[in-house]
Image (spheres, helix red, strand yellow):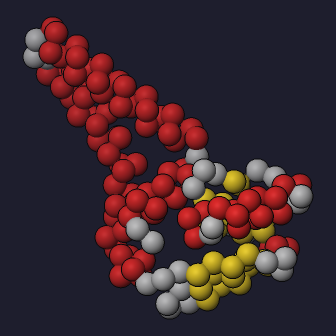
Amino acid sequence: MTYGLLRRMSQDAQGRRQRVIRTLLLALAALAVLLTTLTGFNGRLLYLVLLLCAAFAVTELLPALGWLLQRRLFVEPFRYEVSTSGVHIQTASSQTQIDWSGITRIRRRRHTWLLKYGMSQIPVPRAAFSPEDQRIVDDFLVRRPEFAG
């Protein structure tokens, strides 16, 4: 697991609305900087720019802090197995077996499959599978409409 993969998984887990909000925050910050430079220095606009940049930075800091706090765990290899009985996740320190009967929803994202299991959301990275296996898993999920997401 690399930081880049963890960041992409975190962004996938946040959803599309979060990406739109981040894009709008960045655009507003750029507009405020442009207005500040064209109209001269204005303290209120500077505070607006700092506030927008801080709001944008929060969404980038969450995966970075997660990586810093757990990087020793992420360096160890992860093993993901998807079968007809469920999903098996094995790390250096734990093993988790998630049965299909316990999964209430699966969201297929660009970089991950997000498994809704009770109150938690478990990301399974697509990069852990070959492109052929990714297609097999996607076809399996499409045939199970109860998980549509």
> Can you say whether 53 is above or below 83 in the image?
above
Between residues 147 and 141, which one lies in front from this camera angle? 141
Quarter where residue 28 is shown: top left
Quarter where residue 64 is shown: bottom left
Residue that protrudes farthest toward the bottom in the picture: 93
Q: Please give left or right for residue 27 compared with residue 112 in the image.
A: left
Residue 50: percent from left, percent from top: 23, 34
Report if residue 115 is visible in the image. yes
Residue 123: percent from left, percent from top: 60, 65
Quarter where residue 79 is shown: bottom right
Residue shown at the point (23%, 17%) measured from the top left: 34
Report if residue 106 is visible in the image. no
Q: Please give left or right for residue 149 compared with residue 54 in the image.
A: right
Residue 68: percent from left, percent from top: 31, 70
**Quarter of the picture holding the N terminus:** bottom left
Residue that protrudes farthest toward the front in the picture: 132
> Can you say whether 71 is above or below 144 in the image?
below
Residue shown at the point (36%, 68%) measured from the top left: 67
Q: Please give left or right for residue 80 compared with residue 85 in the image.
A: left
Residue 56: percent from left, percent from top: 35, 40
Between residues 34 and 144, which one lies in front from this camera angle? 144
